[in-house]
Image (cartoon, rainbow, N blue to C red):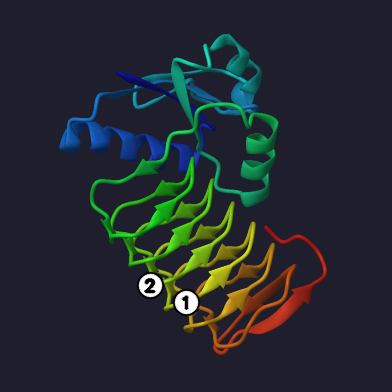
């Protein structure tokens, strides 16, 4: 039996938990969520999720035998997720993939990544560690997503797109084939990207235009 601790206890953590329950039910995976941890534990207003207890802050990680437990960072914010991973990099990280996904052959997925229902990943794409591929997003062939990337619901990345560390692709956005997107980029919901995107900027519209640059955005 694989015992899972979810780091985080807000909305994204609830979706991660639902993925794990789906894997247990539909794939008969021997897996169990034993606890949630959240640094905002005292202010949440609830002490359990799906009848699984929220037992305290991230300091509680030290109470778990690292060889016997697996962890998922259930935090949507890319930079917070990266910070947690870097602080606790030696944990065993579980890669949570919903059973209702379509993942082609020759796809590589990094540790701790979360892939939600109805996601499509086509052949020879590479997904880094601690990424989020949200519900019904489409990752076409030969994409390269670096670490801590978040692709939101119904976004489409056409073939041979590359996305650098920590970037966020907004819901329903479309990225044209062979586009390169820099580090720490935020692409607004519904944006259409037809040109390469530099680091540290925010882009919105159709076609996408830069409205902010020069600072971390996500």
217 lies above or below 62: below
Q: In this view, does 45 lie to the left or right of 197?
A: left
Pinpoint residue 164: horizontal percent, then vertical percent: 63, 64
Residue in the foreground of this view, choosing between 133 and 77 = 133
User: How many numbered circles are shown?
Assistant: 2
Q: Distance between the residues labelled 2 and 1?
A: 6 Å
Q: Which residue is drawn at 57% across and 89% down?
A: 207
Q: Can you say which quadrant of the picture contains the C terminus? A: bottom right
For residue 139, above or below residue 107: below
Say which mark, if any, is on residue 141.
2
The image quarter in which residue 70 lies: top left
Q: Where is residue 162 in the image (x, y as percent from the top left)?
A: 55, 71
Residue closest to the far right: 214
Label 2: element kind: loop
Quarter of the figure that contains the N terminus = top left
Crowding at dot 1, Cα within 10 Å, few <14 / some 14-19 / many 20+, comes out as: some
Q: Is 182 situated left or right of 66 in this image? A: right
**Label 2 with label 1: CB-CB less than 8 Å:** yes
Q: Residue at x 64, y 58 (%)?
A: 165
Residue that label 1 marks: 160
């Amino acid at each position: 039996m694989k015992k899972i601790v979810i780091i985080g206890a807000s909305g994204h953590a609830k979706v991660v938990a639902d993925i794990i329950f789906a894997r247990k039910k539909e794939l008969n995976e021997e897996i169990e969520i034993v606890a949630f941890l959240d640094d905002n534990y005292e202010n949440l207003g609830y002490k359990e999720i799906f009848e699984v207890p929220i037992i305290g802050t991230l300091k509680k990680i030290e109470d778990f035998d690292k060889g016997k437990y697996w962890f998922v960072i259930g935090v949507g914010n890319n930079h917070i997720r990266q910070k947690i991973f870097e602080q606790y990099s030696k944990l065993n990280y579980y890669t949570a993939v919903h059973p209702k996904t379509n993942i082609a052959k020759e796809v590589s997925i990094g540790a701790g990544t979360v892939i939600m229902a109805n996601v499509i990943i086509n052949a020879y794409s590479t997904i880094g560690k601690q990424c989020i591929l949200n519900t019904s997003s489409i990752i076409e062939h030969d994409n390269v997503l670096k670490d801590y990337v978040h692709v939101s619901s119904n976004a489409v990345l056409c073939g041979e797109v590359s996305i650098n560390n920590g970037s966020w692709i907004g819901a329903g956005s479309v990225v044209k084939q062979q586009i390169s997107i820099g580090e720490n980029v935020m692409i607004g919901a519904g944006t259409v990207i037809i040109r390469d995107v530099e680091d540290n900027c925010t882009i919105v519209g159709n076609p996408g235009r830069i409205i902010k640059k020069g600072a971390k955005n996500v």
